[in-house]
Image (cartoon, rainbow, N blue to C red):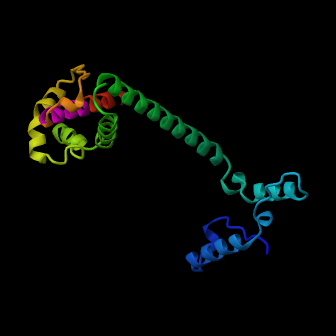
């Protein structure tokens, strides 16, 4: 049984696409491995298989003249931005780890991840801080956390970063002190993300 090419959505117009895909999947599963993909490159016909695949999926025949170059530039620009944001994210996480050595890594990671999610949202500074720690401090009500976050949010408006550090023993802190330090870490994470942007 020859493999049926599945090149684009135009093959699915006018038919039940789910049933068609299921049939293609079943046909692929029941074929022997040699018919599906020539893993042994030294076999006769392997080169013909790859040439046929290249011709079937050649981008220069799908895209109009010049469009391939534009899309390639766009792809590499987006890849560059992704790489830059990943390296900035790692730098921010490392900075938090250095400043708050006594805090459990799970707390730092959870706060940093939450800060990344809310940093671009249109929340008030106070709500951003509370959002960063609320999952870690589920026993606290949101109103209580907002009371603790209010002075930190007010201080953030001045854009003067404080270099608070914590090197103590986390387990020796009271729940109130842990909540305050969690909010301080969230403040530091949000400020670092704002600087990175």
Q: Main secondary structure of the magenta part?
A: helix
Where is residue 190? Give x, y as percent: 28, 33
Describe residue 8's horizontal placement relative to residue 137 as left or right. Answer: right
Does 55 appear above or below 23? above
Describe residue 143's horizontal placement relative to residue 40 as left or right. Answer: left
Does 187 appear above or below 142? above
Does 88 appear above or below 67? above
Q: Could you tell me which residue is drawn at 68 percent across and 57 percent down?
A: 62
Where is residue 11? Give x, y as percent: 65, 72
Please identify the quarter of the rendering in which residue 108 is found: top left
Q: Tell me if residue 16 is in the magenta stretch.
A: no
Magenta stretch bounds: 176-187
Does 196 appear above or below 144? above
In the image, 27 versus 182, the foreground residue is 182
Where is residue 40? Give x, y as percent: 83, 54
Q: Could you tell me which residue is drawn at 19 percent across and 44 percent down?
A: 137
The quarter of the image holding the N terminus is bottom right
Describe residue 51's horizontal placement relative to residue 114 as left or right. Answer: right
Q: How many marks?
A: 0
Q: Could you tell me which residue is drawn at 67 percent across and 67 percent down?
A: 6
In the image, 108 versus 152, the foreground residue is 108
Please identify the quarter of the rendering in which residue 193 is found: top left
The quarter of the image holding the C terminus is top left
Where is residue 118? Give x, y as percent: 28, 42
In the image, 59 versus 26, the foreground residue is 26
Q: Looking at this view, name the residue that lies furthest to the front.
A: 172
């Amino acid at each position: 049984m020859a493999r049926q090419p599945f090149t684009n959505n135009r093959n699915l117009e006018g038919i039940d696409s789910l049933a068609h895909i299921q049939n293609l999947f079943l046909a692929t599963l029941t074929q022997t491995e040699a018919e599906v993909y020539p893993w042994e490159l030294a076999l006769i016909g392997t080169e013909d298989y790859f040439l046929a695949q290249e011709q079937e999926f050649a981008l220069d025949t799908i895209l109009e003249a010049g469009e391939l170059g534009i899309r390639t530039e766009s792809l590499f620009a987006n890849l560059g931005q992704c790489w830059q944001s990943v390296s900035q994210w790692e730098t921010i996480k490392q900075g938090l780890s250095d400043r708050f050595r006594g805090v459990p890594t799970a707390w730092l990671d959870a706060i940093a991840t939450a800060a990344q999610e809310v940093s671009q949202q249109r929340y008030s500074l106070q709500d951003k801080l509370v959002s960063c720690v609320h999952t870690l401090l589920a026993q606290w009500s949101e109103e209580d956390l907002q009371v603790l976050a209010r002075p930190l949010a007010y201080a953030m408006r001045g854009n003067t970063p404080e270099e608070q550090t914590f090197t103590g023993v986390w387990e020796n802190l009271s729940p109130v002190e842990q909540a305050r330090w969690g909010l301080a870490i969230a403040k530091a994470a949000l400020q670092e993300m704002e600087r990175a942007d």
